[in-house]
Image (tube, grey):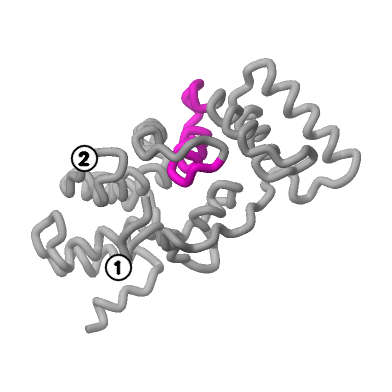
Amino acid sequence: MINDIAGWQIIDECPETPLDKIFPISRRAACLIARNQTKAPLLSTNFLNIQGDRAQNHFEETKAKAEKGDAAAQMNLGTCYFDGSSVAKDVVEAVEWFRKAAEQNFAEAQYHLAICYSVGEGVEKNDAESFKWLRRAAVQNNRKAQYGVALCYSNGEGVKEDNLEAVKWHRKAAEQGYPTAQYQLGRRYYFGDGVLVDYAEAVKWNVTGPLRVDWLQS
């Protein structure tokens, strides 16, 4: 899903999750990832500040809940396997737990599963499956997924290219305060990409979003 200069340039105020490290989301910086770039190291989430026996106990408790069908626990267990936290790293097992939670309509797991399909982590790369799970998360107002859906429509990856749909999903993510979507929406208004040129709207979204937009300085 990464093939233009806009790319997965992302900044977010939310805590990072392991799959987010493939498309980095940080309070500090917006990172541009190209298709040929090496993926960043993965980051533990729930287990960062848990050590020793306590970490192992936490893992066992999470696994027990996951095996009983708790979707949040399934998501967290997938995170453990993906990141190798309190268990041997196993991305295939991670994908299976993400899938179990995703099939229960757990939006964050749907987003993670989509990214696994997008980059071929623990599962064969499949843009159509990636789009399917991104959209399921997006309709639940997961703003990262909404931005991902917009990129899919922009690039025609996993779905037929459709600039109007791309604008719609950029707007949905932007209206939820997703900074990169705000940047992209402002850029669209400035260049008339899928919308009529509207400099006031371009400035509005640039002012709203924290990313520096060099084209407004020219």
Query: Disc 2 designates what residue?
Result: 160
Q: Residue at x 36, y 32 (%)?
A: 132
In the rendered view, tell whether residue 121 sits above or below residue 174.
above
Q: Is residue 84 left or right of residue 141?
A: right
Q: Residue at x 40, y 37 (%)?
A: 126
Tell me where residue 160 sits by quadrant. top left
Tell me where residue 95 sits by quadrant. top right
Position in image of residue 4 (x %, y %): 31, 61
Q: Nearer the viewer, residue 196 or 42?
A: 42
10 Å crowding of disc 2: few (<14), some (14-19), many (20+): few
In the rendered view, tell whether residue 191 sits above or below residue 137.
below
| Residue found at the far right of this picture | 53
| Residue found at the far left of this picture | 196
Position in image of residue 82 (x %, y %): 65, 41
- Inspect the magenta stretch and tell me whether residue 199 lies in it: no
The span shown in magenta is: 102-121
Q: In this view, does 87 lie to the left or right of 132?
A: right
Query: Disc 1 designates what residue?
Result: 206
Earlier sequence position, callout 2 versus callout 1? 2
Q: What residue type is labelled 2?
A: Lys
> Label 2 to label 1, Cα distance in Å?
29 Å
Tell me where residue 206 sits by quadrant. bottom left
- Inspect the magenta stretch and tell me whether residue 110 lies in it: yes
User: Magenta span: helix, strand or loop, mainly?
Assistant: helix
10 Å crowding of disc 1: few (<14), some (14-19), many (20+): many
Q: Which amino acid does label 1 sit on?
A: Asn
| SS category of the residue bearing label 2 | loop
